[in-house]
Image (cartoon, rainbow, N blue to C red):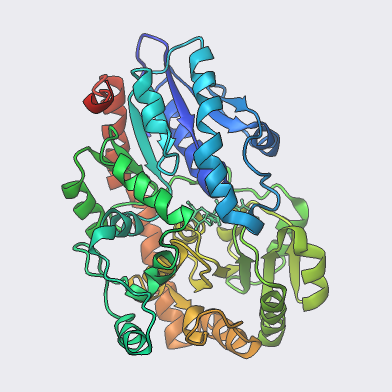
Amino acid sequence: MASTTAAAARHVVALPYPGRGHINPMLALCRLLVAADGSLTVTVVVTEEWQALLASVMLPDRVRLATIPNVTPSERGRGADHAGFVEAVRDKMGEPVERLLDRLELRPEAVLADTFLTWALAAGARRGIPVCSLWTQPATFFLALYHLDLWPPVDGRDSQEELSIKKSLEEYVPVPGLTSIRLSDLKIIRAWERKRPFEIAVEMFADVRKVQCVLFTSFLELEPSAINTIAESLPCPVYPIGPSSALDGDDKIHEEEHREWLDAQPENSVLYVSFGSYIRMPPSQLQEIAMGLRDSGVSFFWVARDKAADVQQMCGDRGLVVPWCEQHKVLCHPSVGGFLSHCGWNSVLEAVYAGVPLLAFPRTWDQLVNARMAADEWKVGIDLRGQKREDGTVTVGRAAISAAVGKLMDSDSGVGQEMRRRAAGLREDSRCAIHEGGSSHRSFTGFLQHLVEGKLNVMKTFQ
Ligand SMILES: O=c1ccn([C@@H]2O[C@H](COP(=O)(O)OP(=O)(O)O[C@H]3O[C@H](CO)[C@@H](O)[C@H](O)[C@H]3O)[C@@H](O)[C@H]2O)c(=O)[nH]1
């Protein structure tokens, strides 16, 4: 993005939610900001644990980490008690962050806060600092949550009601601007009603009406209907600036073992497998996936985190199983032709940027919506959810997995060819969006102007 130089030293504080899927896009935004504005320094506030986890990440000089104590449960094992983690972020992070804000030498002119940090708006307002929000999930899911009031009930109790609910679950969600989302995609969230994550979502969307602007990691061409509807509905500007994890000119995979293994595979022949940074697959499901991959005969590159040794043992030597990799670079390697994914939004955007079709295995929250869009709207994937029994909890069996892998990776079949053609189209759209003159580039420039010209104000309700 274009570089502008302003006279005075300027400072912004970034507050990412403490999870990989949120920190990565916040760091990407910080990189963009300092590259575009030579006078700007960004302080990114993370826990001490996250400072250590980010030790190997290269950051520009003017993006600096500042720490608060480890007030949330450890990132290792976060998936074991997600609700407890969400609650700790809600209740324990605000105070140490506020103390840190008071200690900063250079007063920040704005705070960029993850939308999930419900205490950030009041923290900024108490100090007269404007707050901008970063939403790291799809605009479509944002729009669905913004209109929680329009969702019909879907968790009935008596059998008569359940019958009509089952029938209606495949109906579209009645929120203007949503195109392909069915009630079944949001059922899991409805089921959390009166539970903490749902209450926090309600709080979050009350606050989002009061921030200075909302940045999205999506791009206009990917979700035009949702983004345009949000822009018309919110009282503040909306800036879709993604995809933001572009490779910064360095697309070399640094881990030698990974690079050499991928280099030795034929073009489009490898299925990349990853279920994100913390979600746990039940052992029985892992076993079925491993057997399904083995039976498919397709080569795979599987990121299995702390289960890497077990998984490697389960599925033999047809694939490479590793604890972690440089995902966005691996996806862009020519030998990768498909992605078996839980459909976290960063993974979906990285697949879109790489032009790789998805085998969607959504587990929770926005992932069901993301899988729906990939399979039904953009038609760049197969949704494995269709293989589950109706209660949604039953393990997807090896035969279904093997058949879906075969279908996705068969580039000679009509289905495989069409998905690849569409994925290539989205790849082009995503690259055009971030190049000079593209929709995300223009949007980012607009945000920067908003920042540089000091157009940010603190909400009157908090003054
Ligand atoms: O070996 C790996 C595996 C993952 N990643 C990166 O880790 C991030 C993972 O993010 P995502 O795909 O979004 O998955 P989660 O970590 O599960 O993300 C959480 O946060 C997302 C953004 O808010 C939500 O969309 C998800 O539902 C939620 O689970 C991506 O940037 C990946 O490139 C790596 O770099 N190396």
Of residues 82 and 387, the one drawn nearer to the viewer in this rendering: 82
Instruction: State the residue at coordinates (35%, 59%).
Output: 141
Instruction: State the residue at coordinates (29%, 82%).
Output: 168
Q: Measured from the top left, where is residue 348 in percent x and y?
A: 47, 60
Query: Which corner quadrant holds the N terminus?
Result: top left
Q: Relative to 232, is 286 on the left or the right?
A: right
Q: Measured from the top left, where is residue 89 in percent x and y?
A: 54, 41
- Residue 104 in view here: yes
Query: Which corner quadrant holds the C terminus?
Result: top left
Image vertical order of residue 221 relative to residue 109, above or below:
below
Of residues 426 and 285, the one drawn nearer to the viewer in this rendering: 285
Image vertical order of residue 346 relative to residue 131, above or below:
below
Image vertical order of residue 114 relative to residue 226, above or below:
above
Q: Measured from the top left, where is residue 16 in percent x and y?
A: 50, 37
Q: Measured from the top left, where is residue 186 in percent x and y?
A: 38, 68
- Residue 317 in view here: no
